[in-house]
Image (cartoon, grey):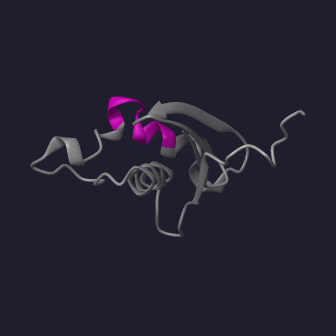
Amino acid sequence: MSSTARDRPQSAHVFVRTEHESLSDTVVRAVSTASGLAATPSSDADLSLDPLYTVIDPDALDTMFAGGAGAGTVTFDYHGYTVTAHGSGRVVLDA
């Protein structure tokens, strides 16, 4: 018996940029929510995310999709997730 997409467990998390949020902020919010880690540094480094700039330039990410440019994606790894940021403001995390 073959496995279909319906039969496989879903490991993707989808988040959408809010009106007053940059795409890089959406990425941090998404990974923080999915992982349970704090988005901002805390006294216990094991409980917070590494800064996004350790894996991608947040300003470049925001500039690349400024003005609501809906076309294009960028994919990178961050805290155990493969992150795909879409120009439309959608962020997909795959474990």
Along the line of sight, which residue is nearer the eye, 46 or 92? 46
Could you tell whether 80 is left or right of 43 in the image? right
Which quarter of the image is occupied by the C terminus?
top right
Corner quadrant of residue 59: top left
At 45% from the left and 53% from the top, the residue drawn is 34
Q: Position of residue 38 (x, y in %)?
A: 28, 54
Corner quadrant of residue 84: top right
Along the line of sight, which residue is nearer the eye, 71 or 6? 6
Q: Residues in magenta?
A: 53-61
Which quarter of the image is occupied by the N terminus?
top right
At 83% from the left and 36% from the top, the residue drawn is 3
At 59% from the left and 46% from the top, the residue drawn is 65
Magenta span: predominant SS is: helix
At 42% from the left and 32% from the top, the residue drawn is 56
Could you tell whether 33 is left or right of 37 in the image? right
Q: Residue furthest front?
A: 1
